[in-house]
Image (cartoon, grey):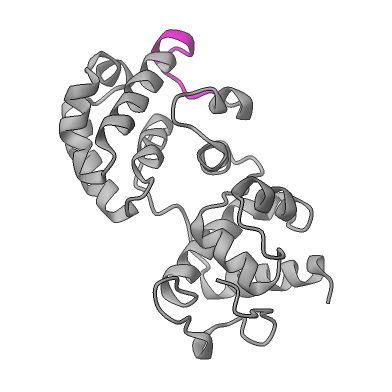
């Protein structure tokens, strides 16, 4: 089975297993996803979803958050960890949205990458979830599972994994595929315990060779 054939079969099975999989960060506007994905670094999505409720209650718009000082933002987002750097990035990001984009999130990958605290993973998430564009989000679940399954060959660097997946994942499938990997990585192909291979829908096609 070629990697392309393996990818299509993995996509098919994960669709059956997780038909409604989507982004696990709560948001109803693009700028809120931008904030949440920054806070999610080294923090669970569940905790982020709780913390941002307080943040948006006090600062309900891009303009309001742009007016807040990094210290005021940090006081609220501190439970997510790395509060100082995350608050600084969020503050700078909101100011740019307000001053350069009329309070809107730019629909351009390179423009997103220029925003404070936004890397390829975050930019891909925005492009896929907000704008419906082809996207591959190489978070820790994606990297771990794609190595175990055999879609990539012992590649750990996020950008290299992303580039390898672009070659074998149909563009229109990328975003949802990565969301399903998150669900599968949390429930079955876990990181901190031995993977539950006995109940994995991919067990007969997985190329896992002890790659962790």
Would residue 175 appear left or right of 48 to someone viewing this image?
right
Above or below for 161 versus 193: above
Total marks in image = 0
Quarter of the image for residue 73 reads top left
Would residue 136 appear left or right of 31 to someone viewing this image?
right
Above or below for 94 versus 164: above
Q: Position of residue 103 (x, y in %)?
A: 41, 17
Is residue 115 among the parts visible in the rendering?
yes
Quadrant of the frame with the C terminus:
bottom right
Would residue 16 appear left or right of 165 to someone viewing this image?
left
Q: Residue at x 58, y 74 (%)?
A: 16
Q: Residue at x 50, y 39 (%)?
A: 122
Q: Residue furthest bottom?
A: 198
Q: Position of residue 11 (x, y in %)?
A: 66, 67
User: Which of the pair 156/145 is nearer the observer?
Assistant: 156
User: Which of the pair 71/7 is nearer the observer?
Assistant: 71
Quarter of the image for residue 204 reads bottom right
Q: Position of residue 88 (x, y in %)?
A: 32, 24
Is residue 180 among the parts visible in the rendering?
no
Above or below for 41 versus 1: above
Quadrant of the frame with the N terminus:
bottom right
Q: Position of residue 114 (x, y in %)?
A: 54, 22
Q: Is residue 15 magenta?
A: no
Q: Residue furthest top?
A: 99
Q: Residue at x 66, y 80 (%)?
A: 206
Q: Main secondary structure of the magenta part?
A: loop
**Which region shows up in magenta?**
98-106
């Amino acid at each position: 089975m070629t990697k392309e054939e393996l990818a299509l079969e993995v996509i098919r099975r994960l669709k059956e297993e997780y038909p409604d999989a989507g982004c696990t960060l709560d948001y109803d506007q693009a700028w809120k996803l931008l904030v949440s994905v920054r806070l999610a670094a080294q923090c669970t999505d569940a905790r982020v979803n709780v913390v941002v409720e307080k943040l948006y209650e006090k600062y309900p718009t891009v303009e309001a958050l742009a007016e807040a000082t990094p210290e005021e933002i940090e006081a609220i987002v501190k439970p997510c960890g790395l509060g100082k750097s995350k608050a600084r990035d969020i503050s700078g990001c909101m100011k740019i949205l307000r001053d350069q984009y009329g309070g809107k999130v730019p629909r351009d990958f390179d423009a997103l990458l220029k925003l404070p605290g936004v890397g390829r993973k975050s930019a891909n998430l925005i492009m896929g979830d907000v704008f419906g564009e082809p996207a591959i989000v190489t978070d820790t679940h994606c990297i771990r599972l794609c190595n175990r399954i055999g879609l990539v060959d012992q590649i750990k660097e996020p950008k290299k994994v992303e580039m390898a997946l672009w070659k074998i994942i149909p563009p229109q499938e990328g975003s949802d595929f990565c969301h399903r990997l998150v669900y599968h990585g949390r429930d079955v192909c876990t990181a901190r315990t031995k993977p539950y291979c006995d109940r994995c829908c991919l067990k007969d096609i997985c190329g896992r060779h002890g790659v962790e």
